[in-house]
Every structure is written in structure tokens, then in C-alpha cells.
Amino acid sequence: MDFSAYRGILIVVEQRAGTAKNVSWQLLGEAQRLAQKLDAPLMALVIGHEVEPLAREAIERGADRVYLCDAKELKDYRTRPYSRVCLHVIEQAKPEIVLMGATYTGRDLAGAIATHLPTGLTADCTQLDVDENRLLLASRPAFSEKMLATILCKQYKPQMATARAGVFMALPRDPSRSGEIVRISPQMNPDEIATEVLDFLREMGRVNLEDAEVIVAGGRGLGGPAPFALLKDLADALGGVVGASRVAVEAGWIDHDHQVGQTGTTVRPKLYIAVGISGAVQHLVGMQHSDVIVAINKDPDAPIFRVANFGIVGDLFEIVPALTKTVIARRGLPFSQSEKADKAVSGEAV
Ligand SMILES: Cc1cc2nc3c(=O)[nH]c(=O)nc-3n(C[C@H](O)[C@H](O)[C@H](O)COP(=O)(O)OP(=O)(O)OC[C@H]3O[C@@H](n4cnc5c(N)ncnc54)[C@H](O)[C@@H]3O)c2cc1C
């Protein structure tokens, strides 16, 4: 087959209710670097209903051209209509590389597209690059995450990959950037779509580490499940969520959803507070690109202090409640939260 007309990189932007997943902007940031190496255009595809602002945001974040498919029947993600739109755009735009987030939706969509094309798909990548032959070097952890395998798709175009959230850096919005928006129509009659979305039910208790701006994470130093309540109080006061090291997860103190690191989630929040976590390399790879890292550890030689912007050497059971109390006071939060923190500082049951 002749793929000589295939050129450029296409990022499929994932959104829900008009809000894009951060991983889409992170991929756009990384793809701009690759597109410059290839001297090729960077394209984005936005699918949904009333999502034109996202097309403009994609341009501000690095895309040269955005394909926009905006229709009522595309309001919610469904495999068949979304994959049809993607296939149509791939046929029209002929990108040599197609990338999307390795989210539940991205994995479903990428698989559905790849089965219709004479190409392969590398899932869950943590590194992307291109070589002198314009081949995508898609690297992902393999063999229980002990090795990094680089996978090439030599014969076919587009080369496809999904990538983990949090490993690449999004570019800041630049309103002065200009680009082209190409409107396309949905590729299906609504009657042909066999599935209907009736409602979205938020799963109670499931944590979204990937998009969190503040994470307060606990490790073996907590000594058991109960002290995670102290971390939750601090996270609540800061508007964040609770993370954990693998040791805490494997001990059964907290769900795997909360695990940060090589075999957990890779995160890039504005603030990461590591509490009673030593800073093993497998933990660091999942959080070291956070904007600001605060480490609380009683061992002044703990490796976590090497990546921390601020370090507090001391007992977490004294420091965390005191920190929560200060945050509550500074932010003027309700009395009930402040009272809870007071009790935690004085060691009373809360
Ligand atoms: C293939 C593989 C994949 C892995 N993937 C991951 C992963 O995804 N995520 C991950 O986290 N780990 C992962 N690990 C495990 C990793 O190697 C470490 O074992 C783990 O991160 C250590 O967890 P920790 O820091 O909670 O525990 P520890 O290393 O035991 O550290 C506990 C820390 O708490 C401090 N402390 C104790 N009491 C207090 C107190 N009262 N106040 C303040 N500080 C206190 C101690 O000084 C110590 O530094 C992986 C390992 C392998 C082999």
C-alpha cells in the first residue's frame, strides 16, 4: 500500500460535557515537539455537542488545524458514531500518527478505529518520539513494568498509540495563536446508532488522581488505614484528593485507585504533599513532575526530600493536623472543619 500522502499528527481530544481531559492537552504539547521534528502539521479532532470552544482551545494549545464534528447525537461518547467520525477524518486528513489518551474512552475508541485500519496500536505509552525514518517510537512499560519496550509500526499508516495521563506537559494557552477549524458532519444517521446513553452515574468514592490539582498522598509511615482520615481532612481543606504509595495499597489501607507511581497513576498536580513516603524510584516516576512537592517525613535522609521543593522533617501525626488547621484558618473555611482540625491537633477523636 502507498502511504506517501500520510503526513502530520492527529490528536483526538477527549471531552465530557464540554470539558476536555487534561491528557488531551498534554498529548497536544508532546505532539508539538514531534511535529516540529517531522516538520509536519499538528492536527486535533474535537467531537461532541456544543464543543466549539474546545476547538479554539486546541489551537491555543498548539494545533495548526482542528477538525470539529459538533452534533446533538454526538453529545455523549458512544463507540460506533465516534469511531466513524474518526475514521472519516483519518481518511480525509491522512495523518501519519494518531494519538489519544489511554483513558477508558481512549482505549475503547483507539481499539475500535485500529480494527478498521490496516495498522497496529500501541497502548498505554509513557514515552513518545520519532526517528529519522518518520517512525513513531512508542514506548510503554512491559513485563510487570520492569522494562520499557519501544514498539514500532513499520509497514502501515497511521501509526497509532494511546498515552498515559500525567506523563507529558500541556502547553499553556496562547490566545494569539491562529489555526484553521474544519467543520465536518457526523458520519451516521442517528437511527443507525444502536446504543443510547440514558444517564451518567458518578461512582461513589472513586478518586480522579489524573485531573486533581492537589494530592495529599500517604505511605507506610501512616502505620494503618485510620490516619488516612487526617490526609483526607488536609486534602478537603486544600480542595484536593488523597493518593497513596504502593505499600499502603498492598497493605489494604486504601484502594488501588489511589496509588501513585509506576504501577499506579502518573500525576502532575499543582501541589503534591507526600506524607510518610520514603521516595522510592517507582513512586517518584509517578509524581516527580508535580509543580510543587512538599514532603513530610521523620527521616531527614529520606530520598523524597531530593525531589521536594519544601521539606518538613518531623512526625506526620503532629504536622498534618497543624497544617490542616492553618489552611482552614487562612482560607476562612467553615467552623465545623476548623473544630475537627482542632481536635485532631489535640489528639481527640473526630
Ligand atoms: C515493579 C515495581 C513497581 C512498583 N510500583 C510502585 C508504585 O506504583 N507506587 C509506589 O509507591 N511504589 C511502587 N513500588 C514500591 C516501591 O519500590 C516502594 O516499596 C514503595 O514506594 C515504598 O512505599 P512507602 O514510601 O510508603 O514506604 P517506605 O519506603 O517504607 O517509607 C515509609 C516512610 O515513612 C516515614 N515515616 C514513618 N513514620 C513516620 C511518621 N510518623 N512521620 C513521618 N514520616 C514517617 C519513614 O521515615 C519512611 O521514609 C513498586 C515496586 C516494584 C518492584
Image: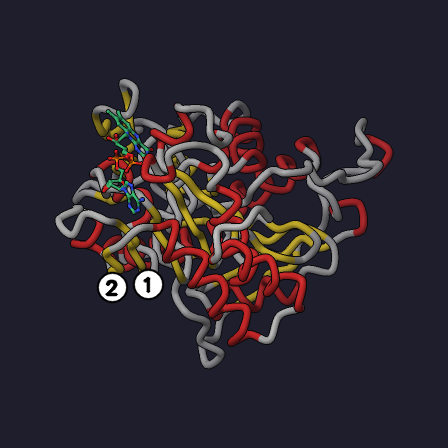
Name the side, left or right, on which 139 lies relative to 236. left
Whole-angstrom CA distance, mark 1 to mark 2, is 6 Å
Q: Foreground: 38 or 240?
A: 240
Q: Residue at x 52, y 27 (%)?
A: 111
Q: Residues within 10 Å of mark 2 (few under 14, many from 20)?
A: few
Q: Which residue is mark 2?
A: 309
Q: Amino acid at mark 1?
A: Val
Kind of element beneath mark 2: loop
Residue 206 in the figure: left or right of residue 277? right
Earlier-in-chain disc, 1 versus 2 = 1
**Residue 97 rendering spot, x and y as whole percentages:** 38, 42
Colour theme: secondary structure
Secondary structure, mark 1, is: strand
**Residue 289 picture location, percent across and down:** 30, 54
Q: Is residue 339 above or below residue 91?
A: below
Tell me the quarter of the picture where residue 278 sits: top left
Q: Is residue 137 visible?
A: yes
Q: Position of residue 236 (x, y in %)?
A: 56, 56
Q: Is residue 304 left or right of residue 18?
A: left
Residue lying furthest top in this view?
143
What label does residue 292 carry, if any? Answer: 1
Q: Nearer the viewer, residue 252 or 204?
A: 252
Residue at 54% of width from left, 67% of height from top?
57
Residue 272 drawn above or below residue 124: below
The reply to whether the C-beta atoms of the residues labelled 1 and 2 are less than 8 Å apart is: yes
**With respect to residue 99, does 305 lie above or below?**
below
Residue 62: name its quadrant.
Answer: bottom left
Judge whether residue 127 can be spotted in this image.
no
Q: Residue at x 48, y 41 (%)?
A: 228
Q: Amino acid at mark 2?
A: Asn
